[in-house]
Image (cartoon, rainbow, N blue to C red):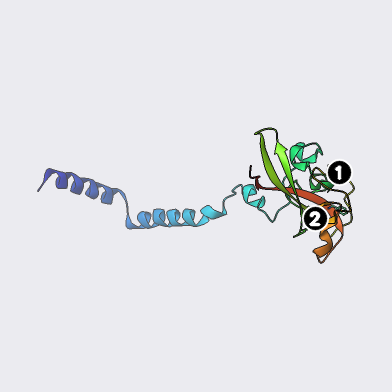
Amino acid sequence: MHPFDRVFEKSARSLAKRSSRRSLLASLGQLLTGAALLPLLPIDRTARAQSPESPVAKPTADEQNCEYWKFCAIDGFLCACCGGTSTSCPPGTQSSPITWIGTCHNPADGRDYIVSYNDCCGKVSCGDCFCNRNEGEKPMYRLSRNNDVNWCMANSESNYHCSVSVILGVAAE
Ligand code: ABN
């Protein structure tokens, strides 16, 4: 017999002498029960609780400041002061599909960005953080170039609540 086989046989026999079939089955049972209970152990699942269906993120100070660069053409209440953020409508409101579009200069990278100002609709006016920057706007006699418009008019609920500012891309030079 090969020496390796002899060592293996010896250790197998010694193990068999030390353990009964009953104890082997008992340890196997313990192992299987432990594995089955593992998913029930307390695990922190808070990360999953912050999914998109959950309350919106906490807005930053910039998002609540009319002077922030991307609000250069806004006319309305900042949604970040109304329970939303600068890019998400507050709970219970719906974004307008038609919007006012502006071009704003970002001093941080020196580039110009196309920004969409969607109104959030379905609740009465928010009343906080009213901003009236209107860069690029033309007087009322040029209706299509004037942003003093309730973009909720095409929504089933046409009450205006606040406006978000979504960056669509870099403006072509
Ligand atoms: N787009 C903001 C807004 C809403 C209602 C009236 C004027 C302006």
Secondary structure at badge 2 equals strand
Q: In this orientation, which residue lies closer to the viewer: 10 or 133?
A: 133
Q: CA distance from mark 2 to mark 1?
A: 17 Å
Circle on res. 173: none
Residue ID at (38%, 58%): 25
Where does the image place residue 102, in percent across and percent down from the top left? 75, 47
**Which residue, given by chain and number where applicable, does mark 1 sit on?**
132
Instruction: Looking at this view, name the residue that lies furthest to the bottom.
Output: 156
Amino acid carrying label 2: it is Cys
Residue ID at (37%, 54%): 23
Image quadrant in which you'd find residue 67: top right
**Which residue, given by chain and number where applicable, does mark 2 sit on?**
120
Image quadrant in which you'd find residue 106: top right
Q: In this orientation, which residue lies closer to the viewer: 7 or 53?
A: 53
Name which of mark 2 and mark 1 comes first in the sequence: 2
Above or below: residue 1 compared with residue 123? above
Q: Quadrant of the C terminus?
A: top right
